[in-house]
Structure formats: structure tokens, C-alpha cells
Image (cartoon, rainbow, N blue to C red):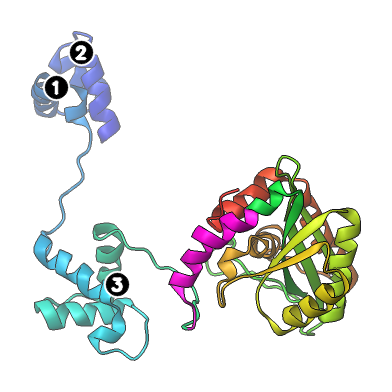
Amino acid sequence: MEARRLLAGRLLLQGKGVSQVAREVGAAKSSASRWNMALEKGGLEALRAKKAPGAASRLTARQKKRLIQILLRGPRKSGYRTELWTCPRVAAVIERVFGVKYHPAHVWKILHEQLGWTCQMPEHQAREKDDEAVQRWREKDWPRIKKGVRRKASIAFLDESGFMLQPVRRRTWAPRGRTPIHRAWDRHDRLSVIGAITVSPHRRRLGEYFRIQARNADAEDLVGFVEQMHRRLPRKIILVWDRSGPHRRAARLLLGKHADWLTVEWLPPYAPELNPEEQCWKHTKYDDLANFIPDDLNELYEAVGTSIGHQHNNARLLRAYFDHANLRL
């Protein structure tokens, strides 16, 4: 109908009469006459289809603003045991507070279309984390550590991670009602990776060093990795990592053997976001190898090595890891 009205409008603009236009588009003369009047008032836009207005919202603007405040306080403040907002729970809160009853399916429209909310996966954060200590480390310790670059020392952020035969599942497109199936091994075979993202004193170049092994990394493995990294970076190294048990033991062994070229700096407890190496693991697991189903550990070994190896040569990506950690280079 809109296409016919627009065609009639263009013909009228060309100077054709109402009767002629009505015949050419197959419409009644009265309709063509009405379109001509609309055209004279508002141009072609007046002939476009207009979305029918829905029913007026039963919640006022002030009530919606108050609803947002209630939702931001969290479900537990509204009497629920868990920190989970669902459409039925929000519908119950609206009915209890404002006396307006909505079907849960319509609550989704209110949250998404009117309030601009989206359904999201919460991030885990340890209760033991000290946000002030994290901020102090960024503002005081990190600038102090960076001065080591001026003393011709490399900075190395070190961490470990595990990779299993089971795929890291991510959302993917598929036909409606046909959920994709991952035929993966149910075994718990895994690889352990030690990695370090480094800052060189020469123009502050970034690098990525790693080692893959078929067992969990212990203190002796960490010592060997740092020593091997030092052979490739024959200069002083400032090693930055968290206070896990293997790290503390490895630090004692390393400082006892190589006190001249090694300095150890500790991250605040429960603050993995300060270590740029964490982003290397996330990039490998959730970007490069998401939904990757290896046949065996050898194929997993090759895929992990390829992913991390590509990151070693991508200075822009490594710099983004520091930006994500809010550590200015």
C-alpha cells in the first residue's frame, strides 16, 4: 500500500491529473484525491506508512525512574535470596510497588526497549579484594616499576593457565530450534601454559614468551621458565606476579640463585585484572579457540601454541592488554 501511494505521489508531482493517476495505480479516485491533498501538505513523506501508536504506558516516567533505582539496589534488597533479576521477579516488584500487573513477557519489553537494559552475565569478584590497594598499585607501584625500564631492565608479567580437551563454549548462530552439538571428549586431559608478557627497555617494545607442558606447573617449572626467558633477554628482569604458593616458592629459589639480575614485584591479592597476561589467556580461549574441539592433546598443543605465538608478533594487541589493565606504558 505504501509503495502504491508513493508511486501515485510521484505521478502527481509529474503533473498528471488525479483521475489518470487513480487509473494507473489501480485505486479509487477518492483515494488519489486524498493522497494529492496529503502530498500538497507534507510531500512524499506524508504518503509513507505510519507506525500505529501502541497503548499508553501504564507506568509513568517518574515510576520508571523509581523502578530503575529499585532494580539497581539488587534483587536481595527486594526480598529475594539470590542476585538474579528475571522477568517474573521484576513483574512481581512492579505489581507490589506500583500496583500495575504485567505479564512477564511484556516486562522484557519494558526493560529492553524502554529502560535500555540488557541481559548480561555477571562478573565474579572476590570479597577479599581490596579496591583501594589495587588503585594504589596502579598509581604508585606501577610508576615506580616502570622506572626500571630506564635502568635497562625488562619488565615481565608472568602467569599460568590451563587448557582442556573440552571446548570453551561460546554462542554461535544456528537455525531456530536446532541447537549445535559439540561431540567432545569427556576426559579431563589438559595442558598447562606458563606465559609472560614483557616490556623491553629498548623503545618499550612488547613481547610474549610461553611454555606449554602436559602437567601442572610447579615452582621448579617456573624457575626454569624464568631462567630460560633470561637467556633470551640477557639483561636485568623485573618479575611481576601474584602471591600464589608456587610463585612465592619460585621467588625464593630464584632470588637465592640470581639475586644480581632479578627483582620480584608482587601484585595486590585477588587482583588478576592488573596482570596483562590474563588477557592473553582470554584472547586464546574465548576468541581464537572458542568452540574448538581438538582430537587429542597434540592438536590442542599445536592450536594453543599457534594462538599465543601470533600474539607475540602483534604489538598492538599486546598494548591493548595493558590498556585493559589500566596500566599506562
Question: If you read the primary sequence from the N terminus, does the residue marked by circle 3 or circle 2 appear first?
Answer: 2
Q: Nearer the viewer, residue 44 or 34?
A: 44
**Residue 35 at x, y percent in the picture:** 13, 26
- Pointer 3: what residue? 105
Tell which residue pokes out farthest to the front in this image.
260
Q: Is residue 301 visible?
A: yes
Identify the residue at horizontal 16%, vertical 55% (top origin). 54
Tell me: 53 left or right of 75.
left
By secondary structure, the bulk of the magenta-drawn segment is best described as helix
Which residue is painted at 15% across and 50% down in the image?
53
Mark 3–mark 1 Cα distance, whole angstroms, equals: 40 Å
Residue picked out by circle 1 = 39
Identified by mark 3, the residue type is Ala
Q: Mark 3 or mark 1: name the one nearer the start of the chain.
A: 1
**Picture quarter containing residue 174?**
bottom right
Q: Residues within 10 Å of mark 3 (few under 14, many from 20)?
A: few
Amino acid on which disc 1 is placed = Leu
The label on residue 13 is: 2
- Which of the image's four quarters has the N terminus? top left
**Residue at 23% across / 85% down in the picture?**
78
Gap between marks 1 and 2 measured at Cα: 9 Å
**Residue interval drawn in magenta:** 128-146
Between residue 168 and residue 177, name the one nearer to us.
Answer: 168
What element does badge 1 sit on? helix
Percent position of residue 196, x then y: 75, 62
Q: Residues within 10 Å of mark 2 (few under 14, many from 20)?
A: some
Numbered circle sitting on residue 257: none
In this rendering, position of residue 31 left or right of residue 204: left
Amino acid under disc 2: Leu
Q: Is residue 174 left or right of residue 133?
A: right
Q: Nearer the viewer, mark 3 or mark 1?
A: 3
Quadrant of the rendered image containing residue 308 = bottom right
